[in-house]
Image: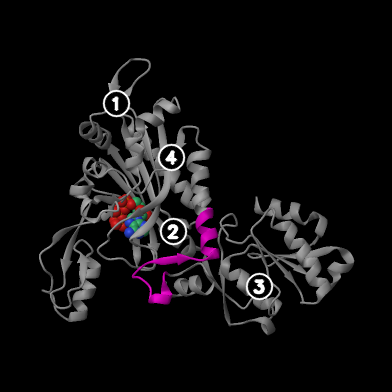
Amino acid sequence: MEKIISLCKRRGFIFPGSEIYGGLANSWDFGHAGTELFNNISALWWKKFVQERPDMLGIRGPVLMNPKVWEASGHVKNFTDPLVECRVCHARFRADKEKELKEHAKEHKEKDIWTESKLFSLLVKTFLGPVEDQQLMVYLRGELAQTMFTDFKIMLETNRRKLPFGIAQIGKVFRNEVTTGNFIFRSREFHIAELEYFVKPGKEDAVFYSWAEAIEKFLTAELGLKKENLRQYEHPSKDLAHYSKGTIDFQYRFPWGWDELWGLASRTDYDLKNHEQLSGQNLKYKDPESGEEFWPYVVEPSVGLERLMLAVLLDGYTETEARSGKEDAVHEVETVLRLKKSLSPVKVAVLPLSKKENLSKKAQEIYQDLIKDFVCEYDETQSIGKRYRRQDEIGTPYCVTVDFESLEDNAVTVRDRDTMKQDRIKIAELKGYLKEKLA
Ligand code: ATP
């Protein structure tokens, strides 16, 4: 984990937020490479779960909603974690995280250090309006699903849908977590990619398992995560959330052990029913053939994008012996981020062999042409070996080297990150070559 955190800072993926003021506990800024990688994961999720699915619709709701939404959803009452406090140092922990409690107790060399467990609300509050004593208390959303429920009827009607169909959203949520940590694994603000899939009651079990298959496929085939680092954990019914009929956690083997990556829940008609009761609006679905009216059941796959990105970084992180030429090697061991090429933050690096003017000019021409189609980086500082290392560390699949021969033969050398194979390619054919390789 330390190696990933250090790589992320060194190469501009992720670093502590507002650091010039000493930072803020567990707040993270994403640099250029981090932003590109995050956007690629987010766009891939959207493509696979919305664009390529005729049964899905997209939506974008606000962070601030009428507080009644959170009453109806049960969050005001039930969106809580059990909290205990250490009597010795007053540190607070989640009472259900046994491993962390044991480790902390060991530090104090005592067992009986915990206060009674209390429920602690995860909803973050804020106040709206210019006049202080008349401000409206609102919650920052703690999950995305509620927009899909409050807008269920309007989405159904404006898009003329029939069951089954789903509504998907990607957006930021806030949770006043008792303990944060493990880098970006658990923060107080993060992005969720979530969808609510509405079905006729009775059909939910088959749909639940078909979404489980879709998630598994996305994690392995699309994100390229190793199968041995993934497993599914089906919750026993006594541990289910207040709205859930069944839950599977897709877990990843993080450096501290197996932990939740993606949740799949069968949410019944709990939310639509409660919103109808509190709002007085009819939120039932009317079957166009039979005329029957009912609240659909809902299946919900929900994943934190930062957490997914951490898994992608951990899974892609590899160390190799110095690869090309000892004289250029920076260290005995070198880092290569073997990301799926489609996810890599930078797709192509253009590297003139030297800073000589005529070489730079040619390399710049190539770079300016390539940036119209790919995220590229231009780099002419330091030795070519060090520049390769830098690109390997951010997972760039292709490095294009412009050398003195290029001025004669109008060709460049393309180096493949994984195979280290070097192909000599005509500049006129370079774009087509890269498009094919990156497809
Ligand atoms: P946990 O048990 O880890 O607190 P949860 O079961 O409360 O998670 P959900 O409400 O199902 O989580 O949230 C959906 C997804 O959002 C999770 O599967 C996870 O990927 C992500 N997630 C949840 N909490 C956090 C957090 N504090 N920081 C980053 N991602 C999170």
Residue 429 occupies quadrant: bottom right
Nearer to us in this view, 371 or 94: 371
List the residue tagged with mark 2: 228
Distance between the Cα atoms at labels 3 and 4?
41 Å
Residue 212 colored magenta? no
Amino acid type of the residue tagged 4 in the rendering: Ile
Q: Which residue is mark 4?
A: 59
- The alpha-carbon separation of the residues under discs 1 and 3 comes to 59 Å
* First along the sequence among labels 4 and 2: 4
Residue 384: image location, x then y, percent: 70, 76
Characterize the local packing of mark 3: few (<14), some (14-19) or many (20 or more) Cα atoms within 10 angstroms: many
Residue at the spot of label 3:
388
Nearest to N terminus: mark 1 or mark 4: 4
**Amino acid found under the numbered disc labelled 1:** Lys
Q: Mark 2 falls on what kind of element?
A: helix
Q: Quadrant of the N terminus?
A: bottom left
Dot 3 or dot 2, earlier in sequence: 2
